[in-house]
Image (cartoon, rainbow, N blue to C red):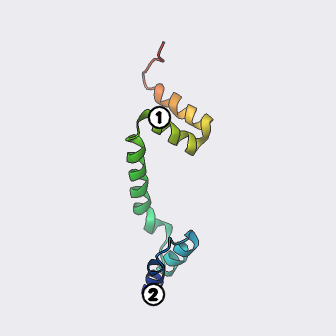
Amino acid sequence: MTLAVTTIIASNQPASVAELVRLAVGWRLTSTDLDEAVHDAADDAAARVSGEGLDGQIEYLVKQLGPIGAQGRIEGAACHGREPAP
């Protein structure tokens, strides 16, 4: 399996999703094997977005959930004891 890893890395081009899936299958990985890596990547993304302030957070929510979904999350967060601004 080292050959497949070397081929993808040595090409100096980003590997496609299909190539990476073939690599993972070749290593006999399952989705469970990548759970920690996915959670780490999501945590990193969340930290980056949170660092962008309210505008960046809302932009992210709209991109991920659409405007209606983002509005629902905003209203849900507001329901934790806050009153709307006058």
The mark lying in front, picked from 2 and 1, is 1
Residue sitting at 56 percent across and 36 percent down?
Answer: 70
Does residue 4 lie above or below 64 as drawn?
below
Quick one: label 2 or label 1, which is nearer the N terminus?
A: 2
Does residue 50 lie above or below 76 as drawn?
below
Report helix, strand or loop for mark 2: helix
Distance of mark 2 from mark 1, alpha carbons?
Answer: 45 Å
Q: Tell me residue 23's x, y (percent).
A: 50, 78
For label 2, the residue is 3
Closer to us: 20 or 25: 20
Q: Tell me residue 31's x, y (percent).
A: 50, 67
Quarter of the image for residue 49 reads: top left
* Number of other residues with Cα within 10 Å of mark 2, as a class: few under 14, some 14 to 19, many 20 or more: few
Q: Tell me residue 59's x, y (percent).
A: 52, 39
Amino acid type, callout 1: Asp
For label 1, the residue is 55
Outermost residue, top direction?
Answer: 86
